[in-house]
Amino acid sequence: MDNNIHEVEFGNSTLTQIEQLYQYDKGQILKIADPIEDGTEVQFSNGNSETTINKAINDSQVEIPDILLQENKKILAYLKIINSDSETTIKTVIIPVKARTKPADYIEPEQEKPFRKYVEEKLENAEKLVAEANDKVKVNEECLKQIDTRTEQATTQITEVTNGKIKDLGNITTAKIGDINALVEAKNKDIDSLVIAKMGDIANVTNAKIGDINNTASAQIDAINKSATAAGESQIKGINTVASSQISSITNITNQQLNNIDTAATHQIGMIENKTSIQIDAINSTATRQIGAINSTALSQIDAINNTATNQIENMTVKYSDMCRTLGIEHEGIINITRNKNVPIDVRKYKYIKFGTANTKGGGFKDYTLPPKNDWCSIHCDKKEIDFTKPSDSLFEVTSNKEYDISTFDDLYLYYSSQDSTDYGYINYKLYNKSEETTEE
């Protein structure tokens, strides 16, 4: 204990004495070992005092007035103690003072401040603190109004962007379907034109071949008639035989030509059908690719809209949490966390913290409680930057929905460990000043 601090204990007595002090001592402290409330009045006096010098106890200690130590007189300190039953007890401390020569470098003490003045200053400071608290409440209300306004504006903007994107997708889809319909119609017209042209070619070839056959038959008949006229009746039988042979030959040739025409027509029709099937397959393939591209674009746009909305909401929540911690408002919020990084937050205005669910990349961006199944990740907290190579009495591992006393913390450091080397996300928390846990009697 310091040499200038003098400890006394009353116990069941109302009178006690400290060791001897010396005249002209300064800065001497009287410490009460018994339980005593801050603000308890102590009245100091000696044999020459016309009035007492009153002081208040702070942290079980009170300063002995330097002005009384200027005299070689025993000092009496009276403590007015009021217990829980409102009973008042006067306890006395005797402070012996031994005479000595005044030191050459002794500086006269300033006039002691009256106890009433001390109390008035304390009340004035308390009123200032109340006024500051009221101002903070007004600021908090204004900030909350601004947050509500910005939240509403952000929601409106997200809705407008979403509706605009949906409208754009509708226009793109309508345009693509129109292009596909136009392509199908054009291909159908091309197929119709090709079929008509091929049928025309077949008809022209058929007519030409029939014309050739008719011409051949007419020539043969003319030759027969001329032979008959020139030879007379004696050769009619031979001519008839020749004619029958010629007619049979003509018939055979005609049948062969007709078979060739049928084969060629069948082949041409088969080629047309094959080309038609290929064209239809190509149209279907093109339409399928176009519809797939439209669907991919729509899904991509929707994902982008969802990501933008989610990021804006998370950013607003983080900013709201930061503002509440700055102003000392009890609140629920989120803290962004990244693997193997210390994240500090100011908690000096709070007594308790409780963590909720975490949401990270390693967990598939789905809510989960801590510690998770199979212990694939963890969050540790401490009042200083976390270094696992150094021991710490204040280090603890987070369990969801458990209350932690942080009344001795100025800053709270969070350290996120994960088996996923690129893991990141956030954790929900609540900061407050009144314990939510009940103790069983």
Image: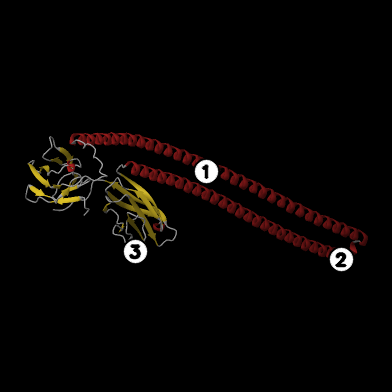
Residue annotated with mark 1: 169
Determine the residue located farthest toward the right in the rendered image.
230
Badge 3, how many Cα within 10 Å: few under 14, some, many 20+? few
Mark closer to the chain start, 2 or 1: 1
Residue 412, given in percent of the width and then of the height, sits at 33, 52
Q: According to the image, label 2 marks what residue?
A: 238
**Tag 2 secondary structure:** helix
Q: Position of residue 348 (x, y in %)?
A: 31, 47
Comparing 358 with 429, the one in front is 429
Q: In the rendering, at what x and y percent does residue 176 appear?
A: 57, 45
Q: Kindly report the distance in space between the C-alpha atoms of the residues bearing marks 2 and 1.
A: 89 Å
Q: Is residue 31 visible?
A: no
Q: Is residue 73 left or right of residue 356?
A: left
Q: Residue at x 93, y 60 (%)?
A: 230
Instruction: Using residue 441 as the reference point, say whether residue 257 is left or right of it.
Output: right
Residue 227 in view here: yes
**What amino acid does circle 2 point to?**
Gly
**Mark toward the viewer: 2 or 1:** 1
| Residue 374 - label | 3
